[in-house]
Image (cartoon, coloured by chain):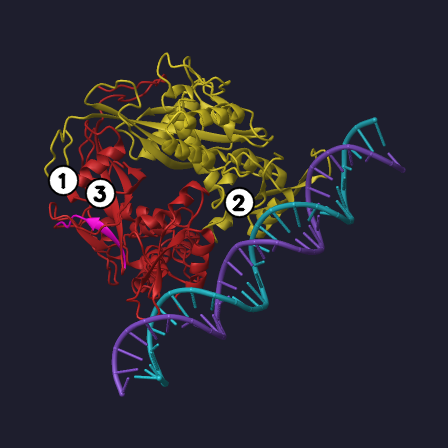
Chain colours: A yellow, B red, C cyan, D purple
Amino acid sequence: MPSSQSDRSSAATDVEGLALFAELSAVIIAASVDGPLVLVRPGVPADTLPAGPLQSGHRTLEAGLRAWVSQQTDLHLGYVEQLYTFGDADRIDMPGRGSRALSIAYLALVRALRASARSGARWQDVYTYLPWEDWRDGRPAALDGIEAYLKAWAAKSPAETGALREKRAALAFGLGTDSWSDELVLDRYELLYETGFVREARQDGEPPPPCPVVDHPMGLDHRRILATALGRLRGKIKYRPVIFELMPESFTLLDLQRTVEGLSGVKLHKQNFRRLVETQGLVEETGEFQTETGGRPARLVRFRREVLLERPSLGLRMSGARRPSL
Amino acid sequence: MPSSQSDRSSAATDVEGLALFAELSAVIIAASVDGPLVLVRPGVPADTLPAGPLQSGHRTLEAGLRAWVSQQTDLHLGYVEQLYTFGDADRIDMPGRGSRALSIAYLALVRALRASARSGARWQDVYTYLPWEDWRDGRPAALDGIEAYLKAWAAKSPAETGALREKRAALAFGLGTDSWSDELVLDRYELLYETGFVREARQDGEPPPPCPVVDHPMGLDHRRILATALGRLRGKIKYRPVIFELMPESFTLLDLQRTVEGLSGVKLHKQNFRRLVETQGLVEETGEFQTETGGRPARLVRFRREVLLERPSLGLRMSGARRPSL
DNA sequence: ACCGCTAATACTCAGATTGAGTATAATGGA
DNA sequence: TCCATTATACTCAATCTGAGTATTAGCGGT
């Protein structure tokens, strides 16, 4: 029986007796030419992320996660980072009084794209689940419905809170302005959850929004976890060279740019992007060329691993993030 | 009995039967004129952070944390954010085979400084526990010993790994260069842990480093948690206006600067700091003045809360972080 | 009333960084 | 050979940054 090891205050209620269950879940991201992919286990009511319970054989949480992933997918995880621990009492319907399911979510980046047959896991476009996050081809169509829906939601409440709601929505979705903050993924998701726009937020029988909703179903709170992961990753690539965890050994600068664009969901200014990569010294030439470019052949470069031991904070600050022509 | 709710692969070992115990712990930070303070429960072998077990009455993790803190300290938490979940099997000596203690750590910022009598909790200078992190009065004395110790540690291993170790240490502590990265708190701690410099990393009987070690004892992995919190906070104040969670209703620009300097552990260029705060529109005048400045009276300002609803990413980018005269 | 001390506030300026171009160089295919 | 296409090089103004200098307004003492 576990008991408090350092608590000296008087706990009013049950110090013992909460049956805990911890699940390790992983948002595994890979890059494709069309954008970021996430590994899911396709399921009948909804897709889910690879996950498994924490076991006594796991010396560390990360080791446990790696064990589950290799058991379920044949994939070797490179970069792994802890994302967030979810533990609301209602995150799983009726887990039973006195028991609680925690979910410790991790973000992992992989190079390979071999979907494992062993488990039936499959790579899915990240934006299948978060279609309003992709601005690479201009304003996402899903935003029309969302914008109207949020306006109605704001109008539905008294003036005071209505104005506040309006502001929150405007901030998260850049309404009214011409600025889109790529990192606010979680803020946007939570707004859509709060308003009942995404399906997992609605009770049985509650009507869907009057506009086409394109949120491919995900189980439990997995869409929230995915949103957390995407937001974190979009932030991280700006100050740490994690993007290279997704790239093959050698690649062209355009490959790199496409990968960054896919993740951050916006188009970048090509010349400035190269300038940034070059001046930061993030890559070095391999001496080889990629000829199937459709135009002049491109130098193949590789990540300069030494930068990890030179300056502590180096990433792609995304200068020249430009709005796709409104 | 909890059981996996979404697992379809064959778990090799015990899917059930791991007795879990989750502790909610809090790094509660407040500002004083001399620098940041952390709330601790002074203890005999070592100080510990306020903490308590997750209970079934806690609807959310954050609610549970707030409940424990108000029970133990009379403090009202304002800003709260989840930090990290620690769960290595060996983080507590021998919790028993088949049982595991998780610690879900939170960072909280408070304005008030009333240490609660109810629990005997006390405010302590953050740098009591991490003395090598404070560069406000020039290079911290503790670094002399650390530098020598790390050099010896690197030399102790074969050339190959030795060089790597040297680089890692140089990167984290800015050895050789004149740059100190305030955010690398956790990297530095982990290096000191790995080398056995901090006392909690040493087995019984293992000799302490040959230099004076000034790491005031902290229980369990609480120093690691504190390091995580400080690093996160140092990063966050640069792009989010969280610093104002530590400030009183009205304050002078110098008060604000001192608070930022205390947290980030470096001195800033005064004129540029003000320029930044002003151009970002982070504060507004109250019309009143602070006269006990020792010189010309200073305007009292307050945080412009509206900025939270204007631009999404606003903080004190710490331009003009200057090295204290080496 | 004046002096000197201290800190607040205002203004300056060169160098670096950014955002947004234009210009030129190699390919493959019609 | 011309053309479409992409890579790569170079330019330039606007802005941002780092580091100053200059001026202002209190206080305490004489």
Which residue bears the numbered disc 1? A7
| Label 3: chain letter | B
Question: Which quadrant is the N terminus of chain A positioned in?
Answer: top left
Asked if one can make out residue A70 in the rendered structure from this viewpoint, the answer is no
Kind of residue indicated by mark 3: His
Q: Nearer the viewer, mark 3 or mark 1?
A: 3
- Residue closer to the observer: B118 or A107: B118
Asked if one can make out residue B77 in the rendered structure from this viewpoint, the answer is yes
Separation of marks 2 and 3 at Cα, in angstroms: 39 Å
Please, what secondary structure does the residue beneath circle 1 have? Answer: loop
Count of picture labels: 3
| Label 1: chain letter | A
Q: Give how far across and how far down residue B54 sits, in percent.
A: 21, 32
**Residue range highlighted in magenta:** B35-43
Q: Quadrant of residue B100?
A: top left
Please, what secondary structure does the residue beneath circle 2 have? Answer: loop
Q: Nearer the viewer, mark 2 or mark 3?
A: 3
